[in-house]
Amino acid sequence: MDGTKSISLFDGKNGDIIRITSMEIEGVMRRRLLDLGFVQGALVEVIRKSPLGDPIAFRVSQTSIALRKEESTRIQGELIRHD
């Protein structure tokens, strides 16, 4: 076992780095996220969670984007680093 943990982006904490392994989003939103760099293998940093946890700001490919719970729970990855 290599010590990585599989989680959704929504479950990440501030400062976590997550490597995307799968994305269960279809249609226009999927295309938009792919264009922004949310592709398999990309490293995503959790920048900031709002007080109620929705939305959450992420950084991927030097771009910051806020995603709602609806999207961030459908993107899975491996927890690479936890601050």
Image (spheres, rainbow, N blue to C red):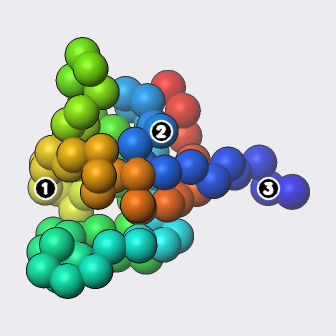
Q: Element at badge 2? A: helix
Quadrant of the rendering where the N terminus is positioned:
bottom right
Q: Specify whether 79 is left or right of 66.
A: right
Q: Residue at x 17, y 56 (%)?
A: 62
Within 10 Å of disc 2 (Cα), the crowding (few <14, some 14-19, many 20+) is some
**The residue under label 1 is which amino acid type?**
Thr
Give me the C-alpha separation between circle 2 and circle 3.
Answer: 20 Å
Q: Element at badge 3? A: loop
Q: Is residue 49 visible?
A: no
Q: Choose top left, top right, bottom left or bottom right for residue 29.
A: bottom left
Q: Residue at x 77, y 48 (%)?
A: 3
Q: Residue furthest top?
A: 51
Q: Specify whether 66 is left or right of 45.
A: left
Are the residues tagged 2 and 3 within 8 Å (C-beta)? Answer: no
The spot of residue 78 in percent (x, y) is 58, 56
Residue position for label 3: 2
Residue position for label 1: 63
Total tally of numbered discs in the picture: 3
2 or 3: tag closer to the N-terminus: 3
Within 10 Å of disc 3 (Cα), the crowding (few <14, some 14-19, many 20+) is few
The spot of residue 52 in percent (x, y) is 26, 20
Please tell me the numbered disc located at residue 11: 2
